Every structure is written in C-alpha cells, then in structure tokens.
Image (spheres, helix red, strand yellow):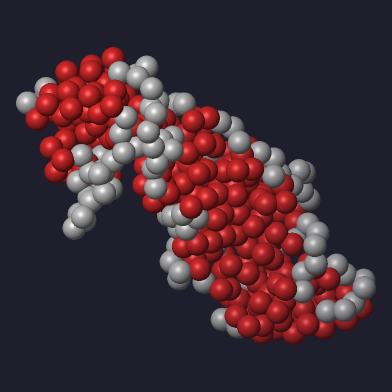
Amino acid sequence: MRFAAAAVALALMTGTTLGTAGPALAQKQEKPKPPKLSKPVLAVVVEVQKLQTAGDHAGALARLDAAKDVPRAEADDALILAKLKLFSAQTVKDNAKLEEGLTEAVEAPSISIEEKTTFSKFVAGLAANRKDYQKAIKWFDFYLSQKPDDVDITVQAASTYAAMGARPQVVALLTKAIDTREAAGQKGDSSWYAFRAQAVMDGKLDDKLMPSLLSWVKAYPTPDNFNKAIEIVKQRGGNMDNNLLIDWGRLMWSAGAMATSNNYLEYADAAIDRGMPNEADTVLKEAIAKKLVDPAKPNIKEFVTIVTTKNAESKAGLAALEKDAGTSPRLALVVADTLANLGQNDKAVGYYKKLQGNAAVDQDTVNLRLGATLLKMGDKAGAKAAFDAVKPGPRAAIAQFYGVIVGA
C-alpha cells in the first residue's frame, strides 16, 4: 500500500507561524504566537527564509543540512527548523527530505499533540514506502493510539505488520477495521476479509479461521468467495469419508459455489457411493453443461453410464424402500436423503424429524440434512433451528456456512 505524501504535505503544515516561509505553512490565527528561538537558530531561520523567498529551495535544504549540529536550545528551535525543511522538501518534491523533516517535527519537544498525531501517519507512510517497517510501525502505533477509529490508517498499519510477518497483529488490526465499519452499518473492503483470512492461515491461528471465513462470506456472499472459504476448511479437514463429502458437496451446491471439475466429480462420486444416484446425475449433468467435464472421455462416459443405471434402479426401488424404513433408523435416513434429492422435500422432512433424538443415527447428520431440506423449501427459520442444533464436530463448519446462507 503506497503512501503519497508529497501531494498532501502542504495541507499538513498548519500550526506554523513562520512569516514569509510560505502561506501554506501559516496557521489561521488572529494573533499568532511568535516562536521562541535561540539566536543561532534564528540566524539560520533568517537565511533559510531568504533562500525560500528567492525560490532557492535546494539552497534552503542545503543550509538546513549544514545547521544540523546547531544546538536546539529553545523550545521551538527544532520544530521551526523541521517545518522550514518540510516546506522546501515539498516544493521540490523530495520525499527523503520530506520524511526527514516530518520525523524531526514529530520528535520536536514543542510540537502539539494534534500536529504530532497528524504528522505521525505521514512519517509512518513514507517509512513504509521505503520498507523501513520498524520506523513505520512506531509511528502508525502512535497515530492509532490517538486516532483509534481511523480505519484507513488501521489497514495501512496491518499491511506494514504483514510485511514484517507479524500475523497476529495483522489479524487484530484488520478485525478492528472491519468491526469499526460494520458497527457503522457498513462493510469493510472485500480485500480486508480475504487479507485477514490469509493472515490467519499464514499465522496458524486456527481458532480464528472459521470466524474470519464466515465474516468474509457473510459480508460478500459471492460464489467465488464461498468456494474459496469452503475449500480452505475442507483442505484442513484431512481425509473425509463420502458420507461427509456429500454434505460438503450439498453445501457448495446450495451456495452456487461449484467452480471446478473436481468440485463436481467429488460430489458426484460421494453421492453415488452413498446411494444417491439421482443427486449424482444432477451434478454430472450440470458439470457437462458447463463444459467442466468431457462426457466423451472414457472414465467420464463410464461414470455417467453407472449413474444413469443406478438412478433408474433407485427410483424403481423407492416405494419398497419406504415400506422397510420403519424397521431401521439407518434405512429411514437413506429414505429421507433419497426423497430430498428427488425433490420430495415434504416427505423427506417428515422422515428427518422422526429421526431427531434417535440415538441409532448421528444427530448432527440428521439436523444438518433437515436444515438443508428446509432451506430448499424456503423455511429459513426452521432451517436455522436445525443448523443451530449441529454440535461441534465434523459437520459444525458446514452448519455454520449454511447459517450464513440462511441469513443472506
């Protein structure tokens, strides 16, 4: 994040009473208080002002450099010399001298807290531009201690900490910037959420991963963001069986976040393995329509044939399967899943609800799939209650992502 100081330097020079040093440096006061200067410094000021009045800013800067060892004995000596340097440095667009002058100003004993605060962010920005991150952070931290709600500078400070590899500070600052914006009824910039999630991952701050990802997709619920966030969590989940992968696939499908051939094929493979050929068929057809998989390839062609055959068998055997559902909770769950992926949602919901509280089947699976089915039916309140019932475990993150979709 670059910091353009030269273009704004003159606007920062308020609060200085230097007479002919330049109108941009003059504070608008009826009775400006004259600076208290020592005689050696006053002599330098007079010489420098003459050079500036003549337009010789290079000469003025050289004279100020020559005066670096002149003692700053009076209260205003250091600040006045610093501001003279600022005026000429800005005029000739010398950012090195501008930073030098700003640094001398913020360190001057007579500078007001208001000016020190204003100048400090420019010192920090210029230092960050030339990769002096320690100096930049010193002054960003000072500025934010005085102006904690300045969101833009908070983000600049986060960028500087990122360059230093200080991930916890990056996350803390970006969270503060985002929270400040959201408390005002706004959203942070999309890049802030992604930047924070990356810092969380780079810093291995595992406890902050889901909150950062959920905040990101809640603020910007685009298919691409959902895809990235879901993939991040899946990659950290290790090896998953198809019973869990089918729930991840359904989530990504519900979010409209299927983006790659692998997304489709993984979901379809999980669906066919778990006895949901109609679901696999739907998924494969969309992948083919989007030209993400080639139906002419032997392996895809064979897969499609298997799915088509099993789909016909599944539909034909559904009635008999329903008759047997009362004999086994596990079979009833299969029936509920089959009905849901066939679009018979009312019947599926009935089966899921009968399975709630039954210890013979995993309750997180039941509640997650009940919520997904209710969401398809438009019952957001019912879906939210079902997702909220999913306890910490393998399906908790899926339920949390669904919760964002419900609230969108």
x 77%, y 78%: residue: 352
For the point 48% across and 42% down, the residue is 140
Residue 385, quarter of the rendered image: bottom right
> Is residue 407 left or right of 352 when viewed as pictured?
left
Q: Is residue 27 above or below residue 18?
A: below
Count of marks overlaid on the render: 0
Side of 260 where 14 appears, left or right: left
- Residue 360 x/y as whole percent: 92, 71
Q: Quadrant of the N terminus?
A: top left
Q: Please determine whether, in this image, residue 393 is positioned above or below residue 94.
A: below
Residue at 32% of width from left, 30% of height from top?
Answer: 38
Residue 116 coordinates in the image, percent (x, y):
40, 44
Quarter of the image for residue 121 reads top left
Q: Is 142 displayed left or right of 80 in the figure?
A: right
Q: Is residue 90 visible?
A: no
- Asked if residue 21 is positioned above or below residue 357 in the image, the reply reads above
Where is residue 2? Give x, y as percent. Answer: 36, 36
Vertical placement of 216 versus 349: above or below? above
Residue 57, horizontal then vertical, whole percent: 16, 24
The residue lying furthest to the left in this view is: 54
Residue farthest front in this picture: 39
Instruction: Please state which of residues 91 and 285 is positioned toward the viewer in this rendering.
Output: 91
Identify the residue at image location x=53%, y=61%: 179
- Res. 136 in view: yes
Of residues 380 and 123, which is closer to you in this image?
Answer: 123
